Image: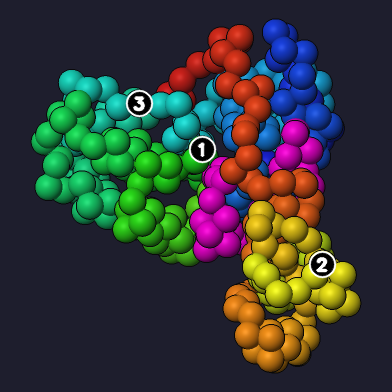
Amino acid sequence: MSESIIEAQDLVKIYRKTKVPAIDGLTLDIKRRGIFTLLGRNGAGKTTFLRIATTQLVPTSGTMRVFGIDVMEDPKSIRRRIAITPQEARPLFTLNPRDHIALSLMMRGASRAEANAKIDPVLRTLDLADVGKVHSEELSGGLRQRILIAMTIVCDVELMFLDEPTIGLDPLGRRKVWQELIRLKNKEGRTIVLTTHYMDEAEALSDDLAIIDRGHVLAKGNPREVKQRNIGPKTRVDVAEGFTFEELSSYGTTIRAGNLLRVFTTDEVAQEISREALRRKVPISISPVTLDDVFVQLAGGEIEEEERKVENQEEEPQRGVLTK
């Protein structure tokens, strides 16, 4: 059995209306039994990649194989073995959380009794037990998002896709989801592919990740490797005033970050800057290098910058829902 559960080779997707590549010659392997994160701005190509991998969208060129199966040749075999939380999905307002979870399981062939046996544990896991019988239209956006996640993680599948799963969740809700995804990976050996533009989420969850921008993979590896390979020094120093750009450049790689000057350097040199800042009575901030720093270095801007709308063009019908 191949170590890779997803293999994309020279993948291209161009939407007919825009003529702009949402994915542009992307090659990527995703290994089994772990959490793999596609990290990038909205519009970078993350959702397009997921929609091709889940057989909902036809690539313009290149190949995509899931479980060793070409997505164009046998999509039904793939669909039976995956589950997805799409970014654009919404719960049915007339159904409650219990109904949604039961529906997700019964669409895959479970009996009502089998579905009922799995409902309460997943409701407790995502703190939905108290609203299990409340119509979705009466719930907050965060609770509705948890329903969609519950519909995915309750399924007994080898491979799960979650597209921006924690959008709209409060910090406690996000961490509940993180804990469950880690449990599914560690205890049940699942493979989880998620997309996010939250750097802390990518750092907390990823066994491996790929930074994507404008349809290209800019970096790939585990978070530590990606930071080491693309930044090198593990410490950053932020200075608001009291130093010139030229002065700080003598200590390490220096960039402008808004109103700040940011230096990437070693712990020892950061202490030198700290002593000089103390002598000058200048406040500074010292912290570890983050994935956000890597993204700025590679993509040339913050991840929250104005996003392109390429992959949200609903120009082509989806190929089907994820049922048996």
Q: Residue at x 75, y 33 (%)?
A: 215
* Residue 294 place in picture, x, y as percent: 73, 58
Question: Disc 3 or 1, which lies upstream in sequence?
Answer: 3
Q: Amino acid at mark 2?
A: Phe
Residue indicated by mark 3: 90
Query: The C terminus is located in which quarter?
Result: top left
Asked if the stretch drawn in magenta spans residue 35, the answer is: no
Residue indicated by mark 1: 163
How far apart are the two marked residues, 3 and 1, measured between alpha carbons? 13 Å
Q: Residue at x 29, y 36 (%)?
A: 141
- Badge 3 crowding class, 10 Å Cα cut-off, few under 14, some 14 to 19, many 20 or more, is some
* Residue 258 place in picture, x, y as percent: 66, 54
Q: In the image, which disc is placed on residue 245? A: 2
Instruction: Give, as a single range, the part of the protein colored magenta.
Output: 194-221
Q: How many marks?
A: 3
Labels 3 and 2 touching (C-beta < 8 A)? no
